[in-house]
Image (cartoon, grey):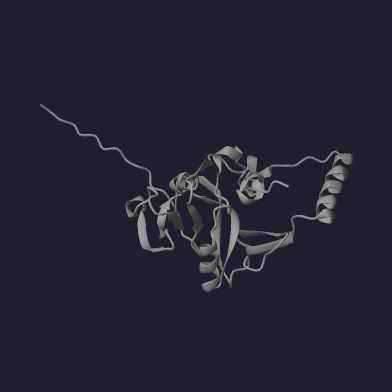
């Protein structure tokens, strides 16, 4: 009766934490993972999606670069040619990309009396066999750490007067105003998007095929004076 866990991105975040543990062997606390929901999407966002043949999907994703694992949840514009475009209603999808098997897509019902009952029965059956989950990757990969330091390409909509400006973007691409709202498109840090998502009247949707770039660490310079 309360859809908050779904529309605010908490349920996919919990699933992502489990997926990260199995995929990369890294145990992450849910509160460490940034989740931006679909509860702020406006009718203008939906119109923009329709006009450009996009759908809007709430995506939970994780990937590894060097010795860091990144993961977050956010809505994204999906092009009609993308495999996730046609996933609708109670169906969920998992897309996996590996080194040798390339991309694989798994689609199935994530809600409903029969799928839920089947999952519960499966768990009960597993208990009778003393089954336990295995985290094999925990013993295979070492020195991996979780990070939110990403630069993400996104569409940001907000009410006029909201303290968001072009200078907040790492790379500003375009912007316009319509019906009392302002729209800006560009690359911005994930942590900043998370802060904006808590402001009234702010909507955030990732760009189609949004670029995800690890954020460069700030370097401090020291000046040495010799007398």
| On screen, residue 191 above or below 185 | above
**Residue 189 left/right relative to 23:** left
Q: Residue at x 41, y 52 (%)?
A: 188
The picture places residue 62, in percent across and down from the top left corner, at: 57, 51
Closest to the observer, 25 or 139: 25
**Number of marks drawn:** 0
Image: 1 above or below 76? above
Toward the left, the furthest residue is 227
Q: Picture coordinates of residue 1 (x, y %)?
A: 73, 47
Quadrant of the rendered image containing residue 184: bottom left
Residue 156 is drawn in which quadrant?
Answer: bottom left
In the image, farthest residue toward the front? 180
Residue at 50 percent across and 58 percent down: it is 206
Seen in the picture, residue 173 relative to 140 is either above or below; the reply is below
| Whether residue 216 can be seen here | yes
The answer to whether any part of residue 22 appears in the image is no
Q: 162 or 166: nearer the eye? A: 162
Percent x, y of residue 23: 63, 49
Q: Quadrant of the C terminus?
A: top left
Q: Which residue reaches farthest top? A: 227
User: Residue 97, position in %: x, y?
Assistant: 60, 60
Residue at the spot x=59%, y=43% of the render?
A: 141
Position of 193 compared to 88: left or right?
A: left
Left or right of 85 in this view: 215: left
Residue 143 or 187: which is nearer the viewer? 187
Pick whichever, 102 or 29, lies toward us.
Answer: 29
């Amino acid at each position: 009766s309360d859809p908050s866990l779904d529309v605010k991105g908490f349920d996919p975040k919990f699933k992502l934490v489990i997926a990260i543990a199995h995929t990369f062997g890294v145990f992450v606390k849910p509160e460490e993972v940034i989740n931006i929901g679909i509860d702020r999407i406006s009718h203008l966002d939906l119109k923009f999606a329709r006009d450009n043949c996009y759908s809007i999907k709430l995506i939970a994703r994780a990937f590894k670069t060097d010795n860091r694992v990144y993961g977050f949840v956010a809505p994204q514009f999906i092009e009609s040619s993308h495999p996730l475009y046609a996933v609708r209603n109670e169906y969920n999808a998992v897309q996996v990309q590996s080194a040798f098997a390339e991309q694989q897509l798994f689609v199935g019902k994530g809600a409903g009396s029969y799928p839920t009952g089947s999952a519960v029965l499966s768990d009960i059956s597993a208990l009778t066999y003393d089954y336990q989950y295995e985290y094999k990757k925990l013993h295979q990969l070492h020195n991996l750490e979780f990070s939110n330091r990403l630069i993400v390409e996104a569409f940001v909509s907000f009410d006029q007067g909201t303290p968001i400006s072009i200078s907040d973007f790492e790379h500003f691409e375009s912007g316009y105003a319509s019906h009392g709202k302002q729209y800006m498109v560009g690359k911005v840090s994930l942590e900043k998007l998370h802060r904006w998502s808590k402001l009234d009247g702010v909507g955030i949707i990732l760009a189609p095929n949004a670029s995800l770039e690890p954020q460069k660490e700030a370097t401090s310079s020291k000046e040495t004076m010799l007398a």
